[in-house]
Image (tube, coloured by chain):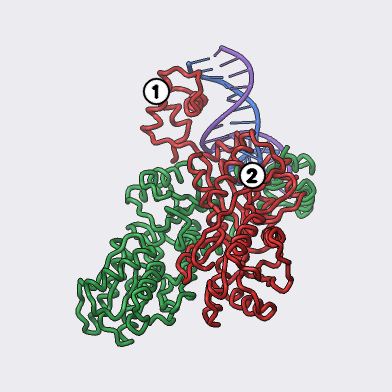
Chain colours: A green, B red, C purple, D blue
DNA sequence: TTGTATGCGTTATCAA
DNA sequence: TTGATAACGCATACAA
């Protein structure tokens, strides 16, 4: 049998209430009984059952993180950051993966608070409707978004406009004038990076040209190879590519360039986005835009804690992080 | 206020016990009250509170996964596999990361069951002492190990001897006779892969040579570069390298070869281990040993479920998975 | 300073 | 087939 608060009480000769007060170190317990109880706790190897605790005080001490997959660089790094700060608290992490099934998404999120499984929720790159968020709010369960923005709750994200601008500006300063852009088909991130690209062109008096844009869908290696071919067909004069779709795709571009006898960076400069591990190992190594993802995850956790503790309000607020240009040999 | 079982009972005009029976679809409830209760549940948007449930039936419906870090390919893929099968159950995943702090490891594991936080535990690549395992057993909390082996609980792992053998054998069949080995300093995996290497040499009548072995510690890119230099110094005649330390290190070897003007596979054949994403993208692409990690994670979860449900015994058993040789251009 | 009583939401046992 | 009651482990208001 498990040792409970009652067993301790019996052993010491006090009531469970007294033991409970000792555990929560109430002030109004005599030093002597405190010591006696503590000794018994140690001797009997007692650990409070967190379920019993949860039931009475309504807290689970769990933080839920919801994402479609945790096997992506972004989600994983976010979790790492969350973990890092969670460590100093007595909260635990529960991971909920929707596994890309949109139909289950809402249900999963809803159950999360109706069943009282977590005291707060961090949602990574997932959309939520206003009605659902309102329910969370009503139930007093704080929500923090990573990447997505929804009226009514704080968001932690990156300055994608700035990232797009930095990369484009760097290419321009390196005397490139015909800058191709490989970028995702849709989404806030893609839109923002695109805006940064256009802003930079504009600021330096370079006209925007539809024929220098290639849209991709899956952000993989093959798309990089294909995109460079497409780009060169549409605009044979490009002297550089900003691959806002990410480093994996950018590496596909590097590969395709090599196969076509195009010299990087001589004939074609390439900039990626993400700074994945391997970007330092390609030849030439890849100049890219790095985002401090783990750091941002930590911040998301801190904001959530602030909301749980009540000193950060449950309302719209965007906290944004600066991207960083990592200069290597591909430009 | 939250909707509880009592509210439903009051609304329908029955007792909470009846409602509970409906929820757990007991056979001995009339179809009529069943329907009435169901209707009320839907109308009032009732969801059972899992904490209340846990308290009475002693189940948490949580599965804990413990690892030192989740930001490694191995841990991450394992979690993916666990997640995949967990999806069809009503269990949740709780992740516990020791963050490499050995001193907290035991404490963390211990609290896991004393505080009744999970119904079962999967331990990834982490050692546990027998005494602790005995405590888990006493408390009736099943434990499944991934990679590590400990008397008294099942382990899910890969056939590393076979992996080592396959790689070495392939090199031999490709007419390589002076096969260098880059491998971790210690641990069961390293020992087993080493055995596979020696077994293969032995079977083909090639003498084992200490001077062809290089030990590494961190499995990173730089160690790969350094190891190749070391190896060539100790044994200038090596015509191939089996980098059992993993693909990241193997890519370091490729890079160092390129810098030294050594042709791969002409002058030097290279085989890695892991089949990380990028191994297909290097030039030449890397021949390597792949392990179906996610698949193994799924299996670990299934074993744990079997133990929880009582039809798999709580005892030593090793379930091993076959590695696969992925043939590319570096041999 | 400590004990008594009560309740958190649910399920299980027994009686009706 | 359903109701009454107790129990899970803990924390708190109130009484002593």
The residue at 27%/78% (across/down) is: A179
Identify residue for label 1: B35
Mark 2 vs mark 1: same chain? yes
The residue at 71%/62% (across/down) is: B205
Among numbered discs 2 and 1, the one appearing first in the sequence: 1
- Local crowd at mark 1 within 10 Å, few (<14), some, or many (≥20)? few
Occupied quadrant, residue B164: bottom right
Q: Is residue B239 left or right of residue A269?
A: right
Could you tell me if residue A221 is visible in this image? yes
Number of the label disc, if any, that sits on residue A251: none
Q: Is residue B129 left or right of residue B3?
A: right
Locate the C terminus of chain A by quadrant.
bottom left
Measured as percent of width and height from the top left, residue B311 is found at 64, 33
Locate the N terminus of chain A by quadrant.
top right
Number of the label disc, if any, that sits on residue B116: 2
- Local crowd at mark 2 within 10 Å, few (<14), some, or many (≥20)? many
Q: Is residue B170 left or right of residue A6?
A: left
Could you tell me if residue B115 is visible in this image? no
- Disc 2 is placed on an element classified as loop
The residue at 55%/79% (across/down) is: B262
Measured as percent of width and height from the top left, residue A172 is found at 30, 84
Distance from disc 2 to disc 1, alpha carbons, whole Å, reads 35 Å
The residue at 40%/57% (across/down) is: A314
Most foreground residue, A36 or A90: A90
Measured as percent of width and height from the top left, residue A204 is found at 24, 84
- Indicate the chain on which mark 1 is placed: B
Vertical position of residue A178 compared to residue A221: above or below: below
Occupied quadrant, residue A330: bottom left
- Indicate the chain on which mark 2 is placed: B
- Disc 1 is placed on an element classified as helix
Tag count in the figure?
A: 2
Measured as percent of width and height from the top left, residue A159 is found at 36, 71
């Amino acid at each position: 049998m498990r040792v409970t608060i009652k067993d301790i009480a019996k052993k010491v000769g006090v009531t469970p209430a007294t033991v409970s007060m000792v555990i929560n170190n109430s002030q109004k317990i005599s030093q002597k009984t405190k010591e006696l109880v503590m000794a018994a706790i140690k001797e009997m190897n007692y650990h409070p059952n967190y379920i019993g605790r949860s039931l009475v005080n309504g807290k689970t001490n769990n933080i839920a993180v919801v994402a479609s997959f945790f096997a992506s660089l972004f989600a994983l790094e976010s979790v790492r950051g969350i973990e890092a700060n969670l460590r100093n608290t007595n909260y635990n992490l529960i991971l909920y993966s929707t596994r890309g099934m949109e139909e289950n998404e809402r249900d999963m999120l809803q159950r999360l608070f109706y069943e009282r499984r977590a005291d707060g929720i961090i949602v990574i790159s997932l959309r939520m409707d206003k009605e659902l968020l309102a329910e969370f709010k009503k139930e007093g369960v704080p929500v923090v978004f990573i990447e997505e923005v929804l009226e009514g709750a704080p968001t932690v994200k990156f300055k994608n406009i700035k990232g797009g601008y930095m990369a484009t500006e760097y290419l321009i300063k390196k005397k490139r004038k015909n800058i191709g852009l490989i970028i995702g088909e849709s989404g806030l991130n893609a839109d923002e990076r695109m805006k940064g690209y256009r802003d930079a062109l504009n600021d330096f008096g370079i006209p925007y040209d539809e024929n220098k844009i290639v849209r991709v869908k899956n952000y993989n290696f093959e798309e990089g190879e294909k995109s460079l071919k497409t780009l060169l067909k549409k605009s044979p004069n490009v002297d550089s590519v900003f691959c806002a779709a990410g480093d994996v795709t950018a590496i596909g571009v590097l590969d395709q360039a090599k196969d076509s006898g195009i010299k990087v960076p001589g004939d074609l400069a390439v900039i990626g986005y993400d700074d994945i591990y391997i970007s330092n190992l390609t030849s030439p190594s890849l100049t890219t835009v790095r985002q401090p993802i783990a750091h941002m995850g930590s911040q998301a956790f801190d904001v959530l804690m602030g909301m749980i503790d009540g000193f950060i309000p449950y309302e719209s607020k965007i906290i944004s992080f600066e991207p960083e240009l990592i200069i290597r040999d591909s430009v």
